[in-house]
Amino acid sequence: MKLEPSKIRNVVLLSHGGVGKTSLADAILFNTKLVDRLGSVDAGNSNVDYEPEEIKRKTTILLKVLPVPWKDCKINLIDTPGYSDFIGEVLSGVKVAEGAIVLVCASSGVQVNTETLWEMLEGIQKPRLIFLNRLDREGASFTKVYKEIREKLSEKVFALQFPIGEQAQFSGIIDVLGKKAYKFSGNGNYQEISVPPEYENTMNELREHLVESVVETDDELLQKYLEGESIIEEELAKSMKKAIREGKIFPLLCGSAIKNIGISHLLDAVKDFLPSSEEGRVEVLNEDGSISYTGIEPNKPASIFIFKTTADPFVGKLALFKVHSGMVRADSSLVNIGKGVEERLGHLSYPKGKTQEPTGEVVAGDIGVLAKLQSVETSDTLCDKSYPIRYNPIKFPQPQYSVAVAPKTKGDEEKLNNALNRLQEEDPTFISYYNPETHQTIVSGLGDLHIEVILERLKRKFGVDVETSLPKIPYRETITTKVKKQGKYKRQTGGRGQYGDCWIEIEPLPRGGGYEFIDKIFGGAIPKNYIPSVEKGIKEAMEEGVVAGYPLVDVRISLVDGSYHPVDSSDMAFKIAGSMALKSAVAEANPVILEPIMYLEVTVPEEFMGDCIADLNSKRAKIIGMEPQGKFQLIKAHVPMAEILRYSIDLKSITQGRGRYRAELSHYDVVPAKIAEEIIAASKKEKEVEG
């Protein structure tokens, strides 16, 4: 039987790290009989987290798609990382999911990243349900955490279930809507029982709250409710289902992934309450840059959206995609609309964690995987020639945390560059580049953990081991006064000698003024054919720097006089003379060192604003503005680049992970004298080591 979009549920698992998303995914695989053992993250034998970096850290790093059959539906479960360093994987998962399961720990409560993810879901109005996990844990409290969820996440959350017992006594769940109780025994088996008398009051209170939550979304039911009319079960259930699918209210369910309690009921809720792919909304990028919306279109020509690529040194590039229109068949061709390249699709598969299941076709609304496509990158659209369409790309955050890397083995530079390019292809939140000023290869990501994992993968997958260091700061040198100096190069050997003589005036330009060279020679003091050599010598000396080996900028240099020898003068002699004049002039023109100043925007909760500003002040920052943004404050500042090389770590510590920032180069400014002395001393020491 052909799979219809109405029978497909694409659901993303979201939470703070360490709350049990992967354990839940393992339990779902076990309950749907796709595996014969219940995998465990702690034991290192999870069926979902299989990458060595994940097993080592006991946490998800890469997005996984796990198709599971449930009753007459196919649920594509998308497991995502819980730590902010890997938010790119989360954004990819959210992009192609019609609904979300947000996990909250019954003992830890609502944690930082859960709040951040909830805000993101609110912004895009994504329907979701909450699964209160780990009710078997010590310290678990349904009452306390349910209250916290309503306070920190949304007052529109209502309890669809609550637990029978807590902590070591947790053994079942009570269905508030159906007024039924279920007792669980190992392996996910359960039996329906009468609601224990001691829970009836709680059930009635929560049911009253459920009814109030639902009727507020339905004018007709609200009228009945206010007039004291009875609302029949079918009306309530139908209205509740509609309101959840529209993202107006959010049901809370209970369970324990590790104890395998409540999993089948959760799957029922996904099937019944979260939207199908048929009901999803797809963003189309129009030619003028605007966004319009469409739905899944089974009857149009084929088009797919690439939401994740991975680089495998053996298999090649794998591309996860979602079919937005038509049907995709093996050995067909589609056009990469953004690059104008036609791609033959070859073999199609369904993703199944670390493996793939071959298929001849993938229908609209479903998720598949393709191998060895040449032009494809994350966020690309591939479509039939007859149906040119482009879907809105995923908006990934810019990497901010950087380290310099160098291969431990000499001769591995090319191997390193190739491997970094492959890793960039699969992770849009990671970039690498060579900085010609500092002669370093720089890798940048979303945090220290992100970079740590990237470098581990670099060694494991591509065999390149690297040393890391702080990125060097691209300082500059400039002058502050006007000076006139001579550069004279004269050498006499047994044969023809060398003679070049020039006088230059050097003066400062405004910051950002760059470099100007003016030829003021008259009367043939220096023949015109030697003037380019003088400038070449000056430019080379400027690149090398005079004070601390950094490029000289923001200067105007006028060539005003000189002399030559009809026999001994040469291009080389005048080039050296120009260099000598420049170095001599700079030494007397009160030189200073300039440092890059970054424009910084920091978004922090109000309670951390004072600590954040104090920290910025200690980093020589100049606060240039503050703006309220709901519960947050936006702090704008100028701060030296040298002071924020590790700012992502500092901000995470200050704000308990709630702060975020972005930085971009603003301008260059003079380094304070004491710090300049340290820079000059460090430069001399480095030259001695190299020498």
Image (spheres, helix red, strand yellow):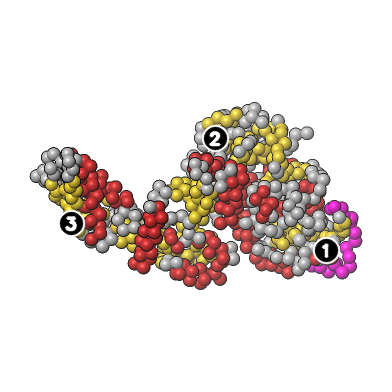
Kindly identify the residue that appears in the image at 60 percent across and 49 percent down. 456
Q: Which range of residues does the magenta coloring cover?
A: 187-209
Q: Is residue 456 left or right of residue 193?
A: left
Residue under pointer 1? 170
Mark 1 neighbour density, 10 Å: few (under 14) some (14–19) many (20 or more)? many
SS for dot 1: loop
Q: Is residue 406 magenta?
A: no
Q: Is residue 459 left or right of residue 635?
A: right
Kindly identify the residue that appears in the image at 71 percent across and 54 percent down. 21
Kindly identify the residue that appears in the image at 13 percent across and 39 percent down. 567
* Identity, as a three-letter code, of the amino acid under mark 2: Ser
Residue 526, x across and y down, in percent? 14, 44
Q: Is residue 192 magenta?
A: yes
Kindly identify the residue that appears in the image at 86 percent across and 57 percent down. 184
Mark 3 neighbour density, 10 Å: few (under 14) some (14–19) many (20 or more)? many
Residue under pointer 2? 375
Give the vertical position of 682 relative to 466 (above or below): below
* Identity, as a three-letter code, of the amino acid under mark 3: Lys
Task: Please tell me how many numbered marks the rendered image carries.
Answer: 3
* Identity, as a three-letter code, of the amino acid under mark 1: Phe
Residue 496, x across and y down, in percent? 16, 39
Residue 93 vs residue 296, the one in the foreground = 93
Q: Is residue 366 visible?
A: no
Mark drawn on residue 569:
none
- Mark 2 or 3, closer to the camera: 3
Residue under pointer 3? 484
SS for dot 2: loop
SS for dot 3: strand
Residue that extends furthest to the front in the rendered view of this protein: 494
Residue 221's quadrant in the figure? bottom right
